[in-house]
Image (tube, rainbow, N blue to C red):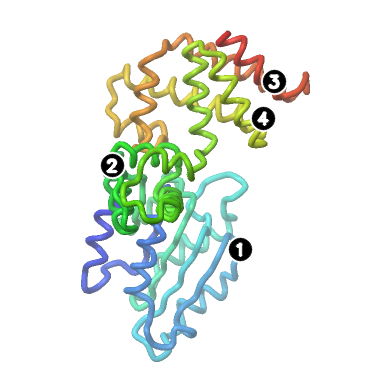
Amino acid sequence: MNYDEFVKYLKQDKMEKNVLLLYGEEVFLKAHSKAELLKKITPAQMPEFNVFEFDGRKYDLKAVDEAIEALPVMSDSKLLTFRNSMIFTISGKDTATKEYKEFWEKRLSDIPEDVFLVFDEEKVDKRSGLYKKFQKQNAFAEFSYLSENKMINWTIGLFRTLGKVISPHDAKYLIEITGEGMMAVKHEAEKVAAFTQGEIQITRADIDAVVVPVIENKVFDMVDAMLSQNAYAALSKLNDLCSLKEDETRILGAISSSVDKILTVKLMTESRLDRTQIASKSKIPPFLVSKYITLSAKYTRENLERLLTMCVDTDRNFKLSQGDKTVLLQRLIADFAG
């Protein structure tokens, strides 16, 4: 299920599924949807005996078994919630152990009808056996980033609830400079609303006065200047980042990531993929895809590949401690754009 399907699912009088997996990049939607779900399925009677919460990868499996098997206390149902159990990942340091995965492989086939299980996960690998079990039963809800148009409309509506008016153009600008989805936009919108006090109309100047763009957005503009052979503008933006005490290694990583994404989008557009396909395959939020498409059209593949190679060389010099890192970043800009 996607978000829209999950909203319809919640409107049913009786929940058809007593085991559900919630995951996805849009944490605001997931948190909101989980809260609405729990309102419907949390036992009203004796919650202290019928609601069990398990957090993280390590919890008492015996306690889980006992909670599932014991009859509800003066209630028609019980609820067990799990947050970041990591049983749906395949590898990596954050994955659950084999013991936990094997436990759930067996346990999930025998859950009483009066027991609700809700898994709230940050990381899910769709290749995992447990995920495929949930997929087969359609017992999951994926909360993906909104499309650009939906995100803009949501932001306009958010400001309306705050007693403000914002144009679609300025809403898009706010979305782009926060770059992290609905939760970040909500946080910044509340700041802008408080800053403007008696003013109704929100302007770009209001946004610039309050909102500090994420480093990825600042670096994106710097990369654009570099690719335009505007070394002065790129160096100016680098100096701004350094004055804010941004870590040089993080700056270089953001440069490399931006260039890589621009190149990836360029190759995808040349292959005639649409925006939805580009967002899915590149892992770029749909509301940011358009600016990557616009920028990728301005520059050649060869130029992007050359900058990416120079970033790799600079990273090597970072690791070999060959000089001051800020100077190395300045040299990268000067050598490429000078």
Residue 160 occupies quadrant: bottom left
User: Relative to 199, is 183 on the left or the right?
Assistant: right
Give how far apart the Cα atoms at labels 2 and 1 are.
48 Å
How many circles with numbers are drawn on the protein?
A: 4
Q: Residues within 10 Å of mark 2 (few under 14, many from 20)?
A: some
Q: Secondary structure at mark 4?
A: helix
Q: Which mark is residue 154?
A: none
Question: Dividing the picture into quarters, in which one does residue 328 lie?
Answer: top right
Are the residues flagged by discs 3 and 1 in contact, CB closer than 8 Å?
A: no
x and y percentages locating residue 132 in the rendered image = 38, 50
Q: Secondary structure at mark 1?
A: loop
What's the amino acid at mark 3?
Arg
Label 2 vs 1, first from the N-terminus: 1
Residue at 21% x, 73% y: name it.
13
Q: Quadrant of the C terminus?
A: top right
Q: Within 10 angstroms of label 4, few (less than 14), some, or many (20 or more) residues?
A: some
User: Which comes sooner in the sequence, label 3 or label 1?
Assistant: 1
- Residue occupying the point 27% across, 46% down: 153
On screen, 23 above or below 242?
below
The circle drawn on residue 167 is: 2
Say which element carries label 3: helix
Please state which of residues 189 and 184 is positioned toward the viewer in this rendering. Answer: 189
Cα distance in 3D space between marks 4 and 3: 13 Å
Q: CA distance from mark 4 to mark 2?
A: 36 Å
| In front of the other: 17 or 277 | 277
Identify the residue position indicated by label 3 in the image.
316
Q: Earlier in the sequence, mark 4 or mark 3?
A: 4
Q: Amino acid at mark 4?
A: Glu
Q: Mark 1 belongs to which amino acid?
A: Lys
Q: Earlier in the sequence, mark 1 or mark 4?
A: 1
Residue linked to disc 4: 248
